[in-house]
Image (cartoon, helix red, strand yellow):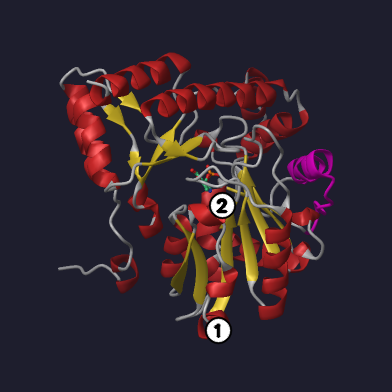
């Protein structure tokens, strides 16, 4: 019989399969399930982007292989987005590579720099692709716990010297999935110094950069010297409700960006140019929908927070993203099971994002206010009986 590769064998099973099975079973039974599980926006892609896409699809020029690092026009729009939003300079010619969603770039990036046995520093709880991409490339992950008492920032001082010596990449993600936390300027400065001192690449995942509430997150390239060591990943997925469109980018240090472009040249043939055309409209057109999205998620966050408070839960109010990270002080899997069985509410066990996520549960606020209120009512019925 065929045997799967050692590489594929190393990839851990998808932890949320069992919850998904139970959820589907309840839906089949006709139960009214409230789903805080998947981090996929419920809001539609803004109309102006859809109109641009329709126009793009009709243009035969866009029907060919896209190839290369993306269209000149889309890369220019990305560069303008950084200048306008963060006053940061990114050269559209040499410092941007368009991706098929940021996940694609994050997963392929270790193939450029990781040799057998090399190490990536991977925050946990965190997005699983940093570890998986490293494993596929033949490397190993050294996990950096994100603890609440440290504002969900990793403690770089605790990484052993022998690990640092073998490290090629450190991954960071702020605004953070799943904790909703931000990185402060001092921490980011420390990270850049750490990377420079130890010749380590910073792979900065900014997928949620535009989902913030009280304050705007810091862009990594506004830190002195960041571009010497950093590649940033971002996409249109969360900012413009375009998760299904599959379009993102990597930007920053040109050596790093071009290495990724070389791997991609040999694996995929780029992002459909009609999508890149619509992407220009997303970044350059009216940003009213982005403002509106922020206020919708903020309202949902506040409704959920006040409900959780009444129920006596412990949490740090998320500063950004549409996630809510709640301390449950017991097995996160048991808590999630209990909530599904008794309240028909789907949530995600924190331990699925890494061992430091144990004792926490993630709620994705990608459902409307009425459903959030309904979920809180059900939780009150369960716990205030
Ligand atoms: C932290 C983080 N990074 C990256 C991504 C990938 O997003 P996309 O591939 O749609 O750009 C996600 C998606 O959920 C995410 O949560």
Residue at which label 2 appears? 151
Q: Position of residue 363 (x, y in %)?
A: 41, 35
Residue shown at 82% from the left, 49% from the top: 88
Residue at which label 1 appears? 161
Q: Residues within 10 Å of mark 1 (few under 14, many from 20)?
A: few
Q: Position of residue 167 (x, y in %)?
A: 55, 77
- Of residue 176 and residue 105, the one placed in the foreground of this image is 176
Q: Quadrant of the C terminus?
A: top left
Q: Position of residue 312 (x, y in %)?
A: 38, 31
Mark 2 residue's CB less than 8 Å from ligand 1: no
**Looking at the rendering, which quadrant does residue 200 occupy?**
bottom right
**Would you say 305 lies left or right of 63 here?**
left
Q: Quadrant of the N terminus?
A: bottom left
Q: Position of residue 365 (x, y in %)?
A: 46, 29
Residue farthest top in this picture: 370
Are circles 1 and 2 on residues that touch, CB within 8 Å?
no
Is residue 80 one of those drawn in magenta?
yes
- Of residue 47 and residue 275, the one placed in the foreground of this image is 47
State whether residue 43 appears in this view.
Answer: no
Residue shown at 45% from the left, 81% from the top: 117
Mark 1 secondary-structure assignment: helix
Specify the principal SS of the magenta part.
helix
**Would you say 71 lies left or right of 126 here?**
right
Give the answer, above or below, for where 150 lies relative to 275. Answer: below
Q: Residues within 10 Å of mark 2 (few under 14, many from 20)?
A: some
**Looking at the rendering, which quadrant does residue 320 occupy?**
top right
Range drawn in magenta: 72-94
Is residue 51 one of those drawn in magenta?
no
């Amino acid at each position: 019989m065929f045997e799967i590769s050692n590489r594929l064998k190393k990839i851990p099973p998808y932890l949320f399969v069992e919850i998904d099975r139970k959820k589907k079973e309840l839906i089949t039974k006709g139960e009214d399930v409230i789903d805080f599980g998947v981090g996929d926006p419920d809001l539609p892609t803004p109309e102006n982007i859809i109109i641009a896409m329709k126009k793009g699809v009709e243009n035969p020029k866009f029907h060919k292989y896209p190839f290369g690092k993306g269209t000149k026009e889309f890369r220019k729009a990305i560069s303008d987005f950084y200048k306008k939003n963060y006053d940061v300079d990114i050269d559209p010619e040499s410092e941007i590579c368009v991706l098929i969603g940021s996940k694609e770039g994050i997963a392929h990036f270790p193939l450029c720099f990781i040799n057998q046995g090399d190490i990536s520093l991977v925050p946990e709880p965190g997005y699983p692709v940093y570890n998986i991409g490293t494993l596929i490339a033949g490397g190993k992950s050294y996990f950096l716990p994100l603890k609440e008492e440290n504002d969900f920032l990793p403690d770089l001082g605790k990484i052993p010297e022998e690990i640092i010596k073998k490290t090629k990449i450190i991954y960071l993600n702020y605004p953070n999935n799943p904790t909703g936390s931000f990185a402060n300027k001092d921490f980011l400065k420390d990270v850049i110094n750490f990377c420079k001192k130890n010749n380590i690449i910073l792979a900065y995942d900014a997928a949620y950069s535009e989902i913030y509430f009280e304050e705007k997150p810091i862009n990594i390239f506004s830190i002195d010297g960041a571009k010497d060591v950093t590649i940033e990943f971002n996409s249109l997925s969360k900012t413009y409700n375009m998760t299904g469109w599959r379009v993102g980018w990597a930007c920053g240090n040109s050596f790093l960006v071009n290495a990724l472009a070389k791997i991609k040249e040999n694996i995929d043939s780029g992002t459909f140019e009609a999508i890149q055309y619509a992407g220009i409209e997303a970044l350059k057109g009216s940003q009213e929908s982005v403002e509106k999205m922020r206020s919708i998620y903020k309202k949902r966050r506040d409704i959920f927070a006040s409900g959780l408070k009444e129920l006596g839960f412990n949490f740090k109010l998320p500063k950004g993203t549409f996630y809510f990270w709640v301390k449950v002080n017991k097995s996160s899997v048991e808590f999630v099971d209990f909530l599904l069985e008794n309240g028909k509410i789907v949530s995600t066990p924190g331990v699925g994002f890494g061992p430091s996520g144990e004792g926490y549960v993630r709620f994705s606020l990608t459902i409307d206010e009425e459903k959030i209120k309904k979920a809180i009512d059900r939780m009150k019925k369960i716990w205030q009986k």
